[in-house]
Amino acid sequence: MVGGNGIKTVGLAPKMDSGFYGKDIISVRQFTRENLSYIFNIADEMRAVVRRVGSTDLLKGHVLACVFYEPSTRTSSSFIAAMSRLGGSVIPINEVRYSSVTKGESLPDTIRTLESYADVIVLRHPEMGASQVAAEYARKPIINAGDGVGEHPTQALLDLYTIQSDLGRLDGLNVVMAGDLRYGRTVHSLARLLCLYDVQMTFVSPEILRLPLDVMNEVKALGRPVRETYDVRDAIADADVLYVTRVQRERFADQAQYDELKDYYVITPELMENAKKQMIVMHPLPRINEISYALDSDPRAAYFRQMENGMYIRMALLAAVLGKA
Ligand code: NCD
């Protein structure tokens, strides 16, 4: 929506061609390579600031509303930490149970309420497309922190930032994504975003958890080479990045089916003997069983670095959207 008060500068989920100021962040489809290097450079600066002095007052006087209709540890707390380290404040609504949503308030009314107090809203919701709906009603920027099985764009940004930081490049890599590719929204965003680079993607899953056709078709339409397999051992051998996801229990109607699939892949040190010495293992977390704890001390295990990077990326995004980058 073209907003009043000059707050939103362009329409719904616009491309970031003219910068991030006042924009919604709904889908990775909005980004270009230039946008990503811009955000990654700011994230590098944020990392340096945090390591040197802990915080700045760049967003002093600004308020973020963090509204989570689904559970979250990393996304919500890294957004809160990001805003705090930039000198701003946060309205944290982590348990919509304790808000007027329980009384039956609609999403548009909740959003309208929060934007009268806050300058930017981070929203996680169980329905695909919810952030887009919120953005239609809101005059202030909406940042999608996960919309059901749809997208998780800020996670994909931090995933790419981690690959770039750890491996020093994005072009020319073989990225293997394994696990629940059907319901895992982080994979839907990451696969789309990787299309901006010259990468080979390999999707590893049991038949029933294959990547949705619409995402696969988008990747293929952009001319990216893709492979699909069930065989994680074979796929690992030439991976530069192994991106593992948990089976998304909350998306299954049939719990017995979840129980059958939940331990389909477990990445162990023994399995990793087949992998390159120079590669990384990633996971958006939380992990259930899919990566053995014994792998945590392997230097190739990047998932804890990935989680820290999330805060720097979110600091960069908040500063950019509020026009202070
Ligand atoms: C992911 C999510 O919520 O989609 N978690 C996260 O934000 N780091 C992944 C998941 O829940 O499996």
Image (cartoon, rainbow, N blue to C red):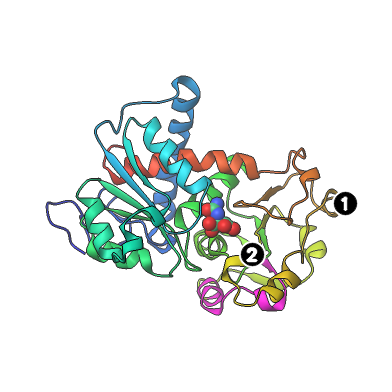
* Residue at 36% over, 62% down: 102
* SS for callout 2: strand
* SS for callout 1: helix
* Viewport quadrant of the N terminus: bottom left
In front here: 176 or 33? 176
Disc 1 target residue = 270
- Amino acid type, residue under disc 1 in the picture: Glu
Disc 2 target residue = 201
Is residue 174 part of the magenta span, yes or no? no
* Residue at 84% over, 48% down: 269
- Amino acid type, residue under disc 2 in the picture: Met
Residue 219 versus residue 79 in the image, above or below: below
- Is label 2 or label 1 in front? 1
Tell me the quadrant of ligand 1: bottom right
User: Magenta residues?
Assistant: 202-220
Residue 294 versus residue 254 in the image, above or below: above
Percent of width and height locating residue 168: 60, 42
* Viewport quadrant of the C terminus: top left
* Ligand 1 closer than 8 Å to label 2 CB: no
* Residue at 26% over, 51% down: 114
In front here: 263 or 295? 263
